[in-house]
Image (cartoon, rainbow, N blue to C red):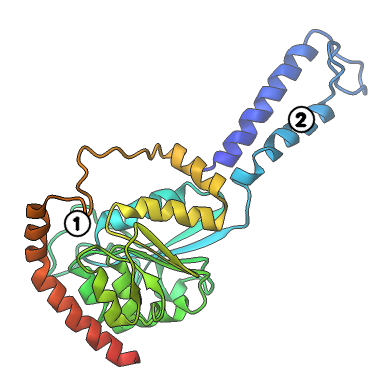
């Protein structure tokens, strides 16, 4: 979205329309400066006013280009990707890459359930920019478990995680980062049912909607991706910038129930989901131990 261009055009059109209305009644002699008889404003002064108006919002529209790489993969949870992507798309001057082994649509692989909304990567691993401002990994089961043992994915993350300004994730994406050896000694969070498994990968499990430890920024489960995205924008740009994006998205959550964490949800809901995830948690723990043994 080119909101900066839109702001420039509206400011210019506003100044230009006012100047045109003033000048139309009296045309200056050939060679004379275009000037309003009412105010004495020239085109040069209108341009200066326009530049001053745009400069007023530099803190919300300026900043160097940000290069953001977002891993996509079969079996990821769409909201884990779409929440942060929506926030990142609101940034000015950004270059976003949806990264995968190739640029074939992800979600309709042979032998896998057909995805209702397949995602088309924009950039193959081999074409990824060498230096990313943000390396991001979404979560999602069963995809997370497969990615934790995919040599090509882990090698790609380890390579680019070593040079990225910020290494980030949402939900169980932190387990994939951990399997690539990128969370050793860092505080991190994950989906509530898998958060404690991070210690198997050398990380320090930490409760929190968003956890920041140096240049590692991890978000909790699923819907925490929007909170994560806004926090990252505040780090990359400024809190004022992040607040403006939040208003642009009208992100003003007011859930109908206060049951969004195991600390708040009814006991029956917690017990049901904990039992449902038990097998997945055991499988993930075994995979995490195997992953750690490869680089420990």
Q: CA distance from mark 1 to mark 2?
A: 55 Å
Q: Position of residue 280 (x, y in %)?
A: 13, 71
Image check: 25 left or right of 102?
A: right
In the rendered image, the residue lying farthest to the top is: 25
Q: Earlier in the sequence, mark 1 or mark 2?
A: 2
Where is mark 2, residue-wise?
A: 49
Where is mark 1, residue-wise?
A: 262
Quick check: 205 above or below 113? Answer: below
Residue depth check, mark 1 versus mark 2: number of the one nearer the observer: 1
Q: Quadrant of residue 65?
A: bottom right
Q: Position of residue 96 (x, y in %)?
A: 46, 59
Residue name at image x 35 percent, y 55 percent: 225
Q: Can residue 153 be spotted in the picture?
A: no
Q: Nearer the viewer, residue 134 or 28?
A: 134
Image check: 92 left or right of 226?
A: right
Q: Can residue 296 be spotted in the picture?
A: yes
Badge 1 marks a residue whose secondary structure is loop
Looking at the figure, which quarter contains the C terminus?
A: bottom left
Residue name at image x 8 percent, y 59 percent: 271
Q: Position of residue 218 (x, y in %)?
A: 38, 64
Image check: 154 left or right of 25?
A: left
| Pointer 1 local density, CA inside 10 Å: few below 14, some 14–19, many at least 20 | some
């Amino acid at each position: 979205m080119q909101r900066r261009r839109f702001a420039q055009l509206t400011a210019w059109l506003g100044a230009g329309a006012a100047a045109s209305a003033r000048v139309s009644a009296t045309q200056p002699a050939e060679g004379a400066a275009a000037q309003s008889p009412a105010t004495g404003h020239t085109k040069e002064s209108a341009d200066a006013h326009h530049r001053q108006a745009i400069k007023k919002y530099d803190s919300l529209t300026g900043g160097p280009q940000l290069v953001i790489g977002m891993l996509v993969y079969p079996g990821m949870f769409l909201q884990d990707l779409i929440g942060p992507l929506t926030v990142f798309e609101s940034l000015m001057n950004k270059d976003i890459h949806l990264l995968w082994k190739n640029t074939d649509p992800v979600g309709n692989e042979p032998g896998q359930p057909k995805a209702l909304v397949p995602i088309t990567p924009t950039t193959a691993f081999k074409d990824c920019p060498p230096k990313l401002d943000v390396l991001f990994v979404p979560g999602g089961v069963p995809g997370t478990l497969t990615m934790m043992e995919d040599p090509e994915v882990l090698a790609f993350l380890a390579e680019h995680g070593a040079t990225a300004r910020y290494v980030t994730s949402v939900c169980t994406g932190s387990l994939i980062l951990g399997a690539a050896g990128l969370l050793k000694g860092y505080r991190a969070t994950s989906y509530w049912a898998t958060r404690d498994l991070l210690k198997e990968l050398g990380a320090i499990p930490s409760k929190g909607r968003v956890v920041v430890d140096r240049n590692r920024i991890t978000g909790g489960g699923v819907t925490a991706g929007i909170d994560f995205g806004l926090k990252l924008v505040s780090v990359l740009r400024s809190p004022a910038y992040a607040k403006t994006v939040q208003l642009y998205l009208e992100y003003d959550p007011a859930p109908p129930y206060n049951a969004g964490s195991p600390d708040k949800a009814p006991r029956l809901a917690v017990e049901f989901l904990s039992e449902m995830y038990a097998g997945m948690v055991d499988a993930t723990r075994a995979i995490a131990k195997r992953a750690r043994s490869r680089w420990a």
